Image (cartoon, rainbow, N blue to C red):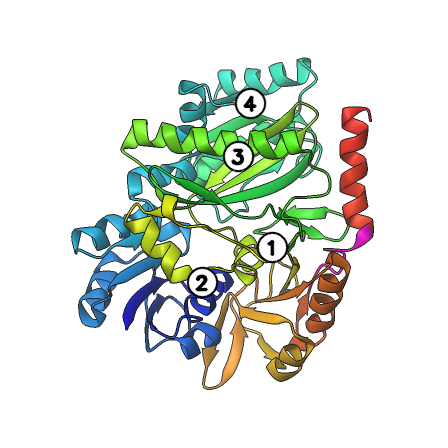
Amino acid sequence: MVRVLLIGGGARESAIAYTLKKNDEVKLYTLMKNKNPGIARLSEEIKLAKETDLNEVKSFTEKVKPDLAVVGPEAPLEAGVVDLLEDMGIPTVGPKKVAAQIETNKEFMRNLLKKYNIKGSLMFKAFEEYGEELESFIDELTEKGIKAVVKPVGLTGGKGVKVVGEQLKDNEEAKKYAKEIFETGLGGGKVLIEEKLEGVEFTLHGFVDIDSIKFTPFVQDHPHALEGDKGSITGGMGSYSCPDHNLPFMTEEDVKLAKEIMEGTVKALKEEVGGYKGILYGQFMLTKDGPKIIEYNARFGDPEAMNILAILKNDFLEICDAIVNKKLKNVDVEFENKATVCKYVVPKGYPDNPVKGEPITVDEESIEKLGAILHYASVNEENGTIYMTGSRAVAVIGVANTIEEAEKIAEEATKYIKGEVYHRSDIGKKELIKKRIETMRQLRGF
């Protein structure tokens, strides 16, 4: 038997747990802040504690004596949980604190790309205080015909980015938001101003063992809260992947360049901080000039993990073992040639003013009969009742030969989740995908 410690309790971690448990040899022990009923069922033992509380992590680890650990969310990576576990002799899938800066410090990421001349970077400046220089940079971008993106340098759970022309009406609102970040300390209280890219977003993940990277299928996430890509930016309302593991608006050259950018980043991290291991997730914008990197995440994307792991052919434990033992080059990582569509069911009002503490009912049996996969996310089970905590609540995934079939399975599954909730029914639909294809066609002048 292999004893695996899992840190985290969301849908991403549910997907990790579910995939690990396909191997009968795995015994799972999970530390999470709320009781996720899906993960709890798969675990031999659970510990309810903050995932960033290193003392709790240490005591639980000493108790369960794992052979391997897997860290799901970004916050414990920033807190140094991998450093702690490896000091305790536990091989861990996830980067140490210094390497996790590729996500936890956007200024570090931008400077790394610039220093090592990695393609796909963009115009940016980081600021430690509000002042004339910040205001001027925003105005300079406008003079060049470029809109500004304002974001905190540190972690904000995917909800700190605001764009002129979208969430921000004009440059004055952009400056006001920057000032607000400094005043509130959001994401560490430092501000990054970047150029707004025009194009279509996509994500690419890789398994990394310091020297090697093995890529997964491309996925497209949908960060806007409302249908038609409207509303606030969220942690992601759903995602899809295609049977050929590409996306319909990407060329072979786009695929090649995106992979080269990530390979260059892995090499740069080895030079700069001694190496990166775990899962590296590149969030890209496909522009008329090719892929540009918006940001990196130092772990699986959520929801993308659910698309990727649903079609992984390998024993996930074997991949985790290869990551921690620098043996990835010997592993042929394979995925089924299937389409996947993930849809998130979220509390009404999410993300700006979500209902909290409301019960949710899930007809698991009916969802299973449909052939859909179910993962609980930000919920808490108490005395047999499942309550929403204010963030994304439940994810459902359809897997099929075509996107159309996968979308129908996922959409049908949402009907069996009841409560003060909503979801985006357009994710995975032909109309939305065609919109992406047409956007790229127009940008490239095809």
Residue annotated with mark 3:
259
- Residue 351, label in figure: 1
User: What is the x, y in percent for residue 403?
Assistant: 73, 57
* Residue identifier under label 4: 122
Which of pointers 2 and 1 lies earlier in the amino acid sequence?
2
Q: Earlier in the sequence, mark 1 or mark 4?
A: 4
For badge 1, the amino acid type reads Pro
> Based on the displayed image, in which of its 4 quarters is residue 208 positioned?
top left
Residue 72, given in percent of the width and then of the height, sits at 41, 56
Q: Is residue 298 magenta?
A: no
Q: CA distance from mark 2 to mark 4?
A: 33 Å
User: Mark 1 vs mark 3: which is more N-terminal?
Assistant: 3
Q: Residues within 10 Å of mark 2 (few under 14, many from 20)?
A: many
Name the front one of labels 1 and 4: 4
157 over 192 or under it: above or below: below
Q: Is residue 370 above or below residue 218?
A: below
Evaluate whether residue 403 shows in this view.
yes
Mark 3 to mark 4 CA distance (whole Å): 17 Å
Q: Secondary structure at mark 1?
A: loop
- Among the 4 quarters of the image, the one containing residue 165: top right
* Label 3 or label 2, whichever comes before in sequence order: 2
Identified by mark 2, the residue type is: Ile
Label 2 belongs to which residue? 16
- The residue range painted magenta reads 423-430
